Image: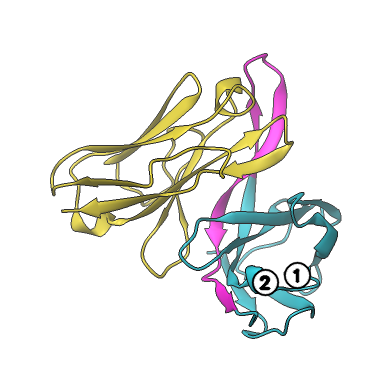
Chain colours: A yellow, B cyan
Amino acid sequence: QSVLTQPPSVSGAPGQRVTISCTGTSSNIGADYDVHWYQQLPGTAPKLLIYAYNNRPSGVPDRFSGSKSGTSASLAITGLQAEDEADYYCQSYDSSLSDMVFGGGTKLTVL
Amino acid sequence: QVQLQESGPGLVKPSETLSLTCSVSGGSISPYYWIWIRQPPGKGLEWIGYVYDSETTHYNPSLESRVTISVDTFKNQFSLKLRSLTAADTAVYFCARGFPYTGYDLSGASYHFHYMDVWGKGTTVTVPS
């Protein structure tokens, strides 16, 4: 059972917009600890996609964006492409655990 | 460009100790966090632990009694030792660099943490049942 809750799967057609939620509590996202997102393409290592809610490392397209509201964060992908099919993980810090916490991951399928 | 490369045995017997090394090329050990994360087959990411300031360590409570992470600044590498292995430790093991930052929580208090900006490709470790 992950501390941060993500939907197991989402899907969308090419060109559409999809969002992936990451729900936490008052001791992590709700306490305003930064949320980071990682993309894991099939058979590869995770890659940093978004850091500190809505900052993109160099090379990450602006089709990817992050946001936060209350105890939840979201990753939005616009103009969905086949190459976006991957697993996505959120990560934050939890003050009650004094530890890094991950979401369980969301599998994005491009129809 | 910083690159990380894991090395170690692919097969370890139950009850034995796993030793993995992550070699860092193209950059220095300081001032980063150095992290081990694993992913059991078909499952999500599990944080194992990290080392920073070359000697300060922090481990996942569920693994703490069996884990040691250390860094060798001269060799530009860091290592993981996981003792008393069982089949449940079968996973892909990733090393990663933690980029440190200072954030501010809801109360305005500052905190220091990191995000993983560079990852190794991962190494598969199998512990037969």
Q: Give the magenta range.
A: B100-125
Please state if B74 lies on the left or on the right of A55 as rendered. Answer: right
The amino acid on which the numbered mark 2 sits, given as a three-letter code, is Cys
Q: Determine contact: label 1, label 2, CB under 8 Å.
A: yes
Q: Which residue is mark 1?
A: B79
Q: Chain of mark 2?
A: B
Q: Secondary structure at mark 2?
A: strand
Q: Which residue is mark 2?
A: B22
Q: Secondary structure at mark 1?
A: strand
The amino acid on which the numbered mark 1 sits, given as a three-letter code, is Ser
Along the polypeptide, which appears first: circle 1 or circle 2?
2
Q: Position of residue B95 (x, y in %)?
A: 62, 64
Q: Position of residue A108 (x, y in %)?
A: 30, 51
Relative to residue B102, is residue A84 depicted above or below? below
Relative to residue B38, is residue A23 depicted above or below? above
Q: Chain of mark 1?
A: B
